[in-house]
Image (cartoon, rainbow, N blue to C red):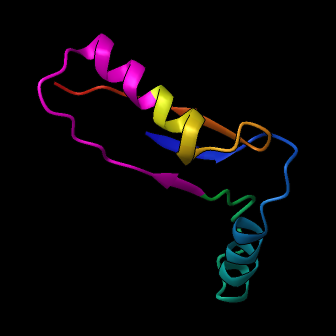
Amino acid sequence: MEIHLRKGVTDPEGENVQKALKLLGFLEVRRVRSSKLFLIELAGTDAKAARKQVEEMCRRLLANPVIHEYAISIEK
């Protein structure tokens, strides 16, 4: 699952990385956005049940719905 800031929310970490890259000579960098990646292994669940559990994890702990969006991918 990947969590990133919603469009329009300030991303100070991404902005600082972009500035540092430009200072290092990478002048073609136009934008940097930060995100978090969580790799969660679940035991004994099918894809539909796994998605439901991970969505609940996002709602309850991992993502703030006011500022974050998230994408879930299920691998078998």
Q: Position of residue 73 (x, y in %)?
A: 37, 28
Q: Which quadrant, please, contains the N terminus? A: top left
Q: Which residues are magenta?
A: 35-54
Q: Residue at x 62, y 59 (%)?
A: 34
The answer to whether 44 appears left or right of 31 in the picture is: left
Occupied quadrant, residue 47: top left
Q: Position of residue 14 (x, y in %)?
A: 70, 66
Q: Residue furthest left?
A: 44
Q: Is residue 16 magenta?
A: no
Q: Residue furthest bottom?
A: 24
Q: Residue at x 38, y 21 (%)?
A: 51
Q: Residue at x 88, y 44 (%)?
A: 8
- Nearer to me, 48 or 56: 56
- Nearer to me, 29 or 54: 54
Q: Position of residue 55 (x, y in %)?
A: 48, 27
The answer to whether 35 appears left or right of 64 in the picture is: left
- Nearer to me, 23 or 73: 73
Decide: is 45 above or below 66: above
